[in-house]
Amino acid sequence: MYSKKVIEYFNHPKNMGKIDCPDGVGKVGNIICGDVMHLYIKVDKNDVIEDIKYETFGCVAAISSSSMITEMVKGKTIVEALKIEKNSIIDSLEGLPKAKIHCSVLAIDALSESIYDYLKKNKRDIPDFLEKRHKIIVKNSR
């Protein structure tokens, strides 16, 4: 059973779409359930995520999680954004069924990958934890 908040974000998604010329793109998927997320970020000179959009092919929970993470991240610095965890998404959506927790993880992974892509494109230092997370995401997507 989905919460009212999950249904609201599914029926009225926020920030859906694609950013032209994004500064970073995170592409992730779950090979077991088939969900795929693309997260696009636009970052200003102070490392603030000034715009964020997503394209998600997936279930109610995947679309709601994608939508929620964009709302949580917009206006935050990349350092602040990287501190967001799956439980923050789950709590903001007023819960997810246990079988759908992986959707919140997918949203976190998409965000991490978009920030990783941004840092790499701009030849910036990539924190060790983000490099490790990136390697795990790449390994799990095979």
Image (cartoon, rainbow, N blue to C red):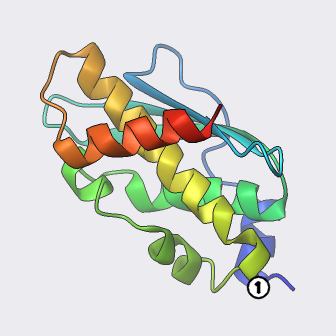
Residue at screen point 82% across, 81% down: 2
Q: Is residue 101 above or below residue 98?
A: above
Work out which quarter of the rendered image holds the C terminus and state it: top right
Residue tagged 1: 3
Residue at screen point 59% across, 41% down: 140
| Mark 1 secondary-structure assignment | loop
Q: Quadrant of residue 111?
A: top left
Q: Is residue 132 above or below residue 66?
A: above
Residue in the foreground of this view, choosing between 75 and 83: 83
Residue 108 falls left or right of residue 35 = left
Q: Amino acid at mark 1?
A: Ser
Residue at screen point 81% across, 73% down: 7
Residue at screen point 50% across, 48% down: 109
Q: Position of residue 35 (x, y in %)?
A: 77, 46
Q: Position of residue 117 (x, y in %)?
A: 37, 25
Work out which quarter of the rendered image holds the N terminus and state it: bottom right
Q: Position of residue 48 (x, y in %)?
A: 24, 42
Residue 78 falls left or right of residue 50 = left
Q: Residues within 10 Å of mark 1 (few under 14, many from 20)?
A: few
Asked if residue 51 shows in the view, the reply is: no
Q: Give the mark count.
A: 1
